[in-house]
Image (cartoon, rainbow, N blue to C red):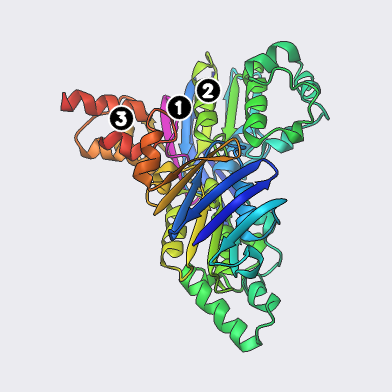
Amino acid sequence: MRVDLEDILFSRGSFSLRGSGIFGEGVHLVSGPVGSGKSTLALLLAGILLPRGGAVRRHGISSTLLLLQSPEYHITSPTVAGEVESWGLDPADLLVQADLAGRGDDDPLRLSRGELKRLILACMISRDPDLMMLDEPFTSLDCVARQEACRMIEDRRGGITIVFSHERAILPRVDAIWEMEDGVLKALGRVPHAIPGWRFAPQYLTYALEQGACPENIRLQDAREALCRIRG
Amino acid sequence: MISISGLRHRMVDIPDLTVDARHLAVIGPNGSGKTTFLSVCSGIEEPRTGTVRILGRPPSAVRTGWVGEFPDRTLLFSLVYDEIASTPRFRNRSCQETDERVRAAAALVGVSHLLDAKVSALSGGEKALVALAAAISGDPEVLILDETDSNLDARTADRIQRVVRESAASHVLWCTQSMDSAAHADHVIFMDGGVVRYCGTPDEVFSRLEDTCFYPTMWRIRR
């Protein structure tokens, strides 16, 4: 299972996006400033936008889901239970999983943004798509909800998960890091080798590297463990 | 000086609070009442009961600049210049004074090169900077930022922090989900369930939050 980007070129107005690389199974983080083209890349990978040049080739992928930055855009039903059913899922089980038991009759638009993101994310993970992409899944969430989203991402078994985010405090354990800047996608490779060359790394990770530590992954706890190893 | 007594408004319940700090960070979980608190302090909403005094006056009598979380939902005009000019224009300033204020605010925020641009052509980060310039062009006594940093990358968020720090406003109230930036405030309020759970210097407040994720990552890693 993999997605190949073969010299893709996409442009809109003065903005253009280009990139090459292979997204294999596991969790990928695409980091980069706001406006660098992360959302556009997600739409290209999902096949919603088509590149002007090059190709996006999907191998062995039979299902693709994209979590939009604004979860409100996913809503198609006036009730939370109806929303879950629209994904072909059983509300009784899913609402327990999403920690929203008893909220089935609520209007999804009356949920807090954190609750709504959790609901849609739980639906997506239950559908277990081969390719799952999450566009800024952590914005507007408090740290408790961000940790919960990370846990859901880490618990996913198999498939390709691509997280597009500028988050710099609470991150999931990932397998590979990519950078996006001014429309250019750059593969940094697999973690942990990719970490020292990551320009958009969280401050705590940069600090750990400066101290001479070698974090095994990108989470705060990885940085702390690495520091403990060298400090004794 | 910000003083609040007997405030009850929607879910927010603050019996008594006095803060005499310039940079006030408001933190807490989603749904803890931070936005409601900021709405009352900015005069956008009148409290149902209780009194709020900022610089000794009710918030509606204070010149306030407000920047929200989603600038593309709050920007009103199609040109950047008109958006920044809206604050002095709404206050009936002369054309010449308006023009001077627009150019000064744009220079301070670093968006002078965008004055002739269409708002719709801006990136999310640029829209936030324009919203900040519009807030500053009114020469505010109080600046209020409601999770403005949540949709911004670190570079743009740092730039906003710097502008806000250097502004002439007597008070800056901002709510954020970035504990690392709240750690640089003069004073921190931690809200939970509509009440002020902790209030004090960053050291005082974060020492109570050390066992939670509401603790700056850089403090966690350095100590």
> Image check: A21 left or right of A145?
left
Stretch of the chain drawn in magenta:
A167-182
Residue at point 54%, 57% (across, down): B3
Residues at circles 2 and 3 in contact by the CB criterion of under 8 Å? no
* Picture layout, residue B117 above or below residue A212: below
Q: Quadrant of the N terminus of chain A?
A: top right
Q: Position of residue B185 (x, y in %)?
A: 40, 52
**Three-letter residue code for mark 2:** Ile
Magenta stretch, main secondary structure, is loop
Q: Is residue A82 left or right of residue B154?
A: right
The residue under label 3 is which amino acid type? Ala
Q: Is residue B20 visible?
A: yes
Are marks 2 and 3 in one subunit?
yes
Q: Residue A172's mark?
A: 1
Quick one: label 2 or label 1, which is nearer the N terminus? 2
Q: Residues within 10 Å of mark 1 (few under 14, many from 20)?
A: many
